Amino acid sequence: MNPATPNVSPLEFASKRDPLVQRFLQELEVRASSAYTVRNYAHALREFAHWHTETVGGAPDWLSLKRDTFRLYIRALGRQGLARSPIHLRFSALRGFYRFLLREGLIQAHPVRDLSLPRRERRLPHFIPAAQMAALLEAPLRMLATPPSKDRPESEAALLWRDAAILEVIYSSGLRISEACGLRQSDIDLAERRLRVRGKGRKEREIPLGRPAARAMERYWKEARIPRSPDAPAFLRGPADSEPAQPVRPIEIQKRLKRYLLSAGLDRKLTPHKLRHSFATHLLDRGADLRSVQELLGHTRLASTEIYTHVSAERLKQAYDAAHPRA
């Protein structure tokens, strides 16, 4: 989805157009929904309002819309050639909005509930093989080992220590990038090698931290001279002496990851979320049970975790086909 309007947040844009949408987005923010969810839902509701205006001849009266209107919208999205996943995303926003209107007592019936949507494509998550993962995690350290230059100024050393640590933590504990960037120093117990993570919907979980990740954190805090304070961000946006201390943003890690992917000979289109996919796949490959992986990932539904069993099964089939003389 395209941004609502340049230099204007989704919430600001909604407030100028629709007070009900504004209240809904404000509730999402209060519930600690991710910035991506707020943005995507704002864009989805704006797109529906635009379609309604163009097709029906006026802005939607959210409180009186009927199911038939949303059936028309599904067909319109299909005629645009939109893939199934984006259609589901748009209707996730609409369902969430109408659940909010129900809770507020503004409507008596949910017009989007139980609508028949196109079946989702079943796409297996991509992951990075263990050997290539090791090369990726070592990439920031290889850059640190090179003398300072135009491409690697001395001032960037602290960022390389930080990147080495955050990539290790994401892969070691299967974190979403937003969860890693949101860690505070008090959330990381290096002695016990344990993390306290705040996931979607403010749900907290405690998960192990591997030895390499714990060592990477210690090195980062020491080498980058990070002041120790329980409420301070675990990963800083800039140098340790910058004021005030700001947590690194996910978009920055996403951009810097491309350098390390190139250094490791991997596809530069891979995202930090692929480290989370790799974490789950590698655990299952080595015998971890599905329920444990579900808890580590913070999945509410086991079905969200089961997709990784299909990845492991497909890998076994490929190995069998390649190696067995009578495959």
Image (tube, grey):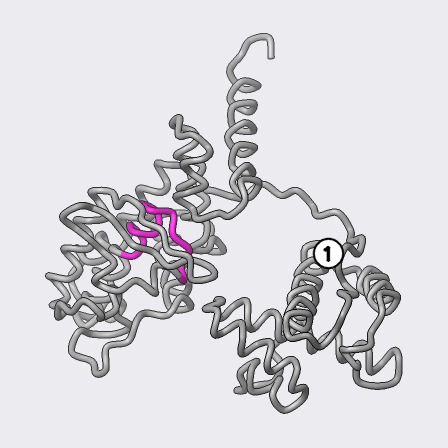
Q: Residue at x 19, y 58 (%)?
A: 144
- In this view, the residue in front, 49 or 63, is 63
Range covered by the magenta-colored residues: 166-178
Q: Does residue 45 lie above or below 255 as drawn? A: below
User: Is residue 276 or residue 262 the one in the foreground?
Assistant: 276
Please state if 193 lies on the left or on the right of 317 as rendered.
left
**Residue pictured at 12% horizontal, 62% vertical:** 223
Three-letter code, disc 1: Ala
Looking at the image, residue 105 sits to the left or right of residue 197; the answer is right
Residue 283 picture location, percent across and down: 39, 34
Q: Position of residue 193 (x, y in %)?
A: 20, 46
The residue that mark 1 highlights is 83
Classify the position of the C terminus by image quarter: top right
Q: Is residue 121 above or below residue 83?
A: above
* Above or below, 275 relative to 163: above
Q: Which residue in the rendered view is the most extreme toward the bottom?
A: 16
Residue 140 in magenta?
no
- Residue 170 belongs to the span the image colors magenta: yes
Q: In the figure, is residue 301 to the left or right of 226?
A: right
Q: Quadrant of the N terminus?
A: bottom right
Give the image location of residue 202, x and y in percent. 42, 62
Question: What residue is drawn where x is 69% and y is 64%?
Answer: 95
